[in-house]
Amino acid sequence: MIPIRHIGIKIVLMASCALIGAPALAEPPPSMAQATLVYNLSKFIVWPKEVFSDPDAPCTFCLLGQDDMEKELALLNGRILNGRKVLFRPIQEATPPMECQVLVIGALEETDLAAVLELLERQPVFTVSHTLRFAKRGGMVEIVSSGTRVFFHINLDAA
């Protein structure tokens, strides 16, 4: 007969051997947390009625410039945000009339970023980026990542 404490030790050893051979659970990429943050913050935005062409018009999320969030933002297609379907589309330039309610700004040259922010200064477009000092430059929300954590800075004047 095997004493109970030996059985317990064998179970612990077998379990630890199984865990050593098991692959580690992959953490989601930071871009997933960032895209989720953009979507969740957008739930709190109230756009003027004239922003949408009709009551069934989608809420359009646009991506300007290259960004790691592109795949994750594309996954938002068809989700519902404040009673409207989400439509995602990458754009090449931010020129009026802008058909985007949410604009995620990826990597842009410094002068291009300044021009885009100036163009959108009085427009009803929610601007988000993880570009360094984005909120201080006139953007509405700057996403800041630290390891697996995601924070944000809000520019209340721009918002």
Image (cartoon, helix red, strand yellow):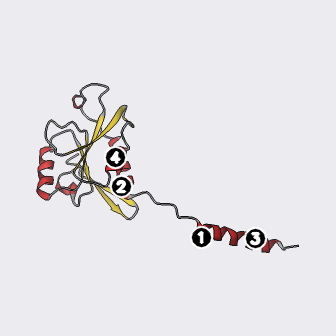
- The residue singled out by tag 4 in the image is 73
The residue wearing badge 2 is 31
Separation of disc 2 and disc 1 at Cα?
Answer: 29 Å
Q: Is residue 153 toward the left or the right of residue 2 in the image?
A: left
Tell me which amino acid carries mark 3.
Gly
Which residue sits at x=34%, y=57%? Answer: 151
Q: Earlier in the sequence, mark 2 or mark 1?
A: 1
Would you name the residue on which mark 3 appears? 8
Tell which tag, 1 or 3, sits nearer the viewer. 1
Q: How many other residues sit within 10 Å of disc 2, few (<14), some (14-19) or many (≥20)?
A: some
* x and y, in percent, of residue 20 in the image: 59, 70
Q: Residue at x 38, y 65 (%)?
A: 147
Query: x%, y% of residue 2?
Result: 85, 73
Residue type of the residue flagged with mark 4: Leu
Q: Which residue is mark 1?
A: 20
Whichever of labels 3 and 2 marks the residue nearer the N terminus, that label is 3
Q: Secondary structure at mark 2?
A: helix
Q: Identify the residue shown where x is 13% and y is 38%.
A: 96
